[in-house]
Image (cartoon, coloured by chain):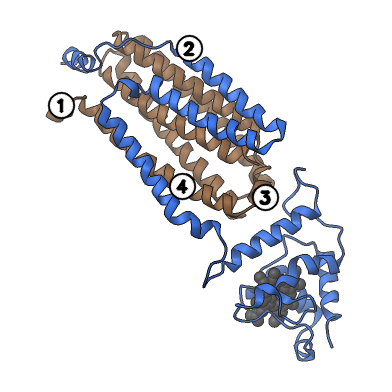
Chain colours: A blue, B brown
Amino acid sequence: MTTHENTAAHADHGEHAHPNYIKVWGILVVLLVVSVCGPMLGIQAVTIITAFGIAVVKAYLVAKNFMHLNIERRFVVYLLLTMLAFMLLLFGGVAPDVMRHSGRNWENIAAKAEIERALAKASGVAEKKPAEPATPQASSAADNYKSVCAMCHGEKGEGNGVAALSMTPKPANFADPAFWQTRDKAHVEKVIREGGPAVGKSPLMAPFGARFNAQEISALADYLMTFKK
Amino acid sequence: MQKPIATTRSMAGLPTGRLAVWWVIASEIVIFGGLLVSYIMHRLGHPEWGGYASHTNTWAGAFNTLVLLSSSLSAVLAHQAAERGDGKKAALLLRLTCLGGATFLGVKALEWSHEIRQGFVLSTNGFWSFYYTAAGLHALHVIAGMIIMLIVSRDASKGRELQRVELIGIYWHFVDIVWIFLFPLLYIAK
């Protein structure tokens, strides 16, 4: 039984000549080294070629020499290529919506806010340096407000920042004296730290407890009061 | 033990078992492909993700790439040995391949615990969600491959079912190829 099967399996590949596997492996390792060293030059085009171009070459070498796709039935190759083509189709169909954050009648506010927040943070701390996620920042409350909150709450705290245009509910208006009648500093600190939902407000007001430490939050709360008219 | 007839047939011009493996891989391409393609489009739409990626450890990733490439070598050498009828050697080489898989997982475990201790978890942001999902799904495939390989190697060491050595090898190479793409996507592009 077993011998019969083995011969059947072999008849199929016809006892193919084996490539020099160790040599193939050697080439793969050299390519790996190149792909790791590529980015050290610091040129983006080079990085893309050495990282992704080489990945394609490595995948090709493995598929051809280790998986023996070069001597496999052609339809298997076509089957796999069809699947890859589906992936291109998926990318072509969906990527435009995911990669752009606004279009004729829509705007991805969350994505824009995330980018803005992250970029502001990155310009605050030295890049590359392996920083803690909640890096304490030395910048002043006014700077923090401008780079993080103003987008929604507006430069003057009137709740009319650029991102607020299509927002419901509207961001709080700190210039409105009525706002301050019902809220004390502890409340405001809690909102900044834990987000809108923590005080029964909208989740559009995100929590910033991971972003700012207690001192910074306190300073921000004081700063907000300066908007009061 | 009696085998199903389909097992011993080769209707499509190649042994049924091998056809089945290709079929599995075809669907795996869509699983991993869908995940990676979504990652790529988000990555391109989020300039800040490059900063997040700078926290992944390129050296750990590179070492693991080397480990997987080498384990692919031993898998294909096992296939060669099996084709020559040397079940003992094939079994040995398959177990060596498993050792590669275990090393890979060990490095992964160290990496992940370090990152989690730094506060980067599945829910930190989009980048880390993709990072843990893609690498985690891949690690599950490594584990599955190792289990199958241990079973195949037990038979092979007794000279039985030697054709399966090639089949598990094909799967393993595929898992290797997935990592070949995960490595630049998650580690090199910063």
Is A128 left or right of B45, judged from the image as shown?
Answer: right
Q: Nearer the viewer, residue A123 or A194?
A: A123
> Which circle, 4 or 3, is nearer the viewer?
4
Amino acid marked by disc 1: Lys
Other residues around mark 4 within 10 Å, as few (<14) / some (14–19) / many (≥20): some
Marks counted in the figure total 4
Do marks 4 and 3 both belong to one polypeptide chain?
yes
Q: Secondary structure at mark 4?
A: helix
Where on the picture, by quarter, is residue A46? top right
Residue B77 to residue A116: above or below? above
- Residue at image coords 49%, 31%: A56
Q: What residue is pinned by disc 2? A: A22
Amino acid marked by disc 2: Ile
Is A113 left or right of B147, judged from the image as shown?
Answer: right
Q: What residue is pinned by disc 1? A: B3
Do marks 2 and 4 both belong to one polypeptide chain?
no
Amino acid marked by disc 3: Gly
Q: CA distance from mark 4 to mark 3?
A: 24 Å
Q: Quadrant of the N terminus of chain B?
A: top left
Residue B14 to residue A15: above or below? below
Which circle's residue, 1 or 3, is located before the other in the chain?
1
Do marks 3 and 2 both belong to one polypeptide chain?
no
Question: Where residue A177 sits: x, y (%)?
Answer: 80, 90
Other residues around mark 3 within 10 Å, as few (<14) / some (14–19) / many (≥20): few
Please report, as a chain letter, where disc 2 is located: A
> Which circle, 1 or 4, is nearer the viewer?
4
